[in-house]
Amino acid sequence: MASNDMHDRLLPIARFCAPYSTVGALFMYIVALLIAKQPFYLLGLDDFEQSRENALGSMWLFIAIVLISTAYMGYESSTRRNYDLVETGNSPNLPRGMSSYNYYSDNPDVELTPIRGSGSFDNDDDILDDLREFS
């Protein structure tokens, strides 16, 4: 499956970006605070207000990356685990002795027979007669 390959590549990226961006957001907050409170420690800044706004903008970008990465990791942990367990047949939710919920793939000797009247409503009278027999 191509989509699983993409998810397998994105999850490590999200796991790397979340802590990296957390540190980046904290650092940019400290830089913005330093520019606002003690700009004389930073040499080479011509416009302190513009520099502070740029630092805060970078901080919000890092926070957005943290939120996106965390949301993706949460989504993957809630959906991927269940999909993998059911797909491989190792689901702890299956009753004892069952390898999957697909009965017919586990028992190839079972022959499927069509039910009379299924799939169309051409024989409404036959169906009504059958229902009358049971009531």
Image (cartoon, rainbow, N blue to C red):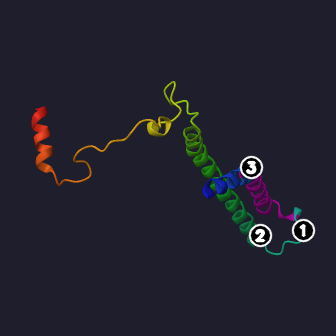
Horizontal and vertical percent for residue 74? 60, 46
Locate residue 71, reporting x and y percent: 60, 51
**Residue 43 is inside the magenta segment:** no
Q: Is residue 112 left or right of residue 14?
A: left
Q: Is residue 101 left or right of residue 34?
A: left
Principal secondary structure, stretch drawn in magenta: helix
Residue 86 x, y percent position in the rendering = 54, 39
Given residues 105 and 39, the one toward you in this image is: 105
Is the Cβ of the residue at disc 2 closer than 8 Å to that at disc 3?
A: no
Give the magenta-colored segment's residue range.
18-40
- Please state, as top left, top right, bottom left or bottom right, where the N terminus lies in the image: bottom right
- Residue at the (48%, 40%) spot, across then down: 105
Q: Which mark is residue 51?
A: 2
Task: Identify the amino acid type marked 3.
Answer: Pro
Mark 2 or mark 3: which comes first in sequence? 3
Identify residue type, mark 1: Leu
Q: CA distance from mark 1 to mark 3?
A: 30 Å
Gap in angstroms between the C-alphas marked 2 and 1 = 12 Å
Comparing 59 with 66, the one in front is: 66
Label 1, on which residue?
43
Q: Secondary structure at mark 3?
A: helix
Question: At numbered mark 1, what does the secondary structure look like: helix, strand or loop?
Answer: loop
Residue at the spot x=61%, y=52% of the render?
72
Task: Give the quarter of the image for residue 38.
Answer: bottom right
Mark 3 lies on residue = 19
Helix, strand or loop under label 2: helix
Q: In the shown orientation, is residue 38 left or right of residue 89?
A: right
